[in-house]
Amino acid sequence: MTLAVLINKGRLARAATATPATAATPTGARAGTVARVATVAVASSPIDHTKTTVRWWVRFPNLAPVEVLFTPGATQAQVGAIYPGARIEPQPDPPHRTATPAEAAELRELVALIFADDTEGHRAEALAAALADPDGALTSFRLLAADVMERERHDARSGDA
């Protein structure tokens, strides 16, 4: 069964759009022709506007798309409110895995170091986000911790002079 037949039978009525084709070449005696297409059918999945997602594509006209991450996840309406005029598309969330006991222990240490000056509530929120994505958190938090330790070494050297 073709896509056009499915659309005509109403099976894809909520997930497809039919758009009349327009010529893409200039007119005139020397102009070439484009394929003669009466209608182009495009199928797309309907977007659940109430679902929260962490990863979103933000696309402005004439600009490269930007991937934006939200923690906690955001709905399409929330992302659209931040980026008015952009086309907002959800990206699949990465597969979820649980941190190993060793990773969880390292993440607790990293959070304590990086967020030492924050409230207990902020540290708990950071740890929860880190445990939800241990691979990304370990990569990011190890780099942040190295930066924190380098600043502390620099401050110690400056204080000794």
Image: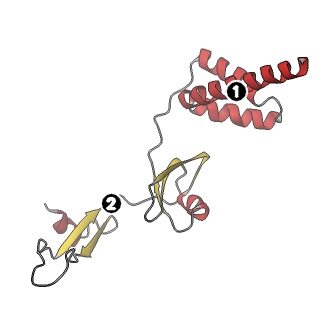
**Residue count near mark 2 (Cα–Cα under 10 Å), binned few <14, some 14–19, many ≥20:** few
Q: Amino acid at mark 2?
A: Ser
What is the C-alpha distance between the residues marked 2 and 1?
Answer: 44 Å
Query: Residue 44 placed where, x, y %?
Result: 32, 60
Query: Residue 53 placed where, x, y %?
Result: 53, 49
Which residue shows up at 50% across the image and 28% down it? 97
Of labels 2 and 1, earlier in sequence is: 2
Q: In the image shown, does 47 or 151 lie closer to the viewer?
A: 151
Q: Amino acid at mark 1?
A: Asp
Which residue shows up at 57% across the image and 23% down it? 99
Q: Is 11 left or right of 152, judged from the image as shown?
A: left
**Residue under pointer 1:** 147
Residue 106, placed above or below residue 144:
above
Q: Quadrant of residue 144?
A: top right
Which colour assignment does the render follow? secondary structure
Q: Is 48 left or right of 140, judged from the image as shown?
A: left
Query: Residue 38 placed where, x, y %?
Result: 16, 77
Residue 9 seen: no
Which part of the image, by quadrant, shows the C terminus?
Answer: top right
Q: Secondary structure at mark 2?
A: loop
Q: Is 151 left or right of 11, judged from the image as shown?
A: right
Q: Which mark is residue 44?
A: 2
Which residue shows up at 20% across the image and 65% down it? 6
Residue 37, placed above or below residue 101:
below
Residue 151 seen: yes
Q: Which mark is residue 112?
A: none
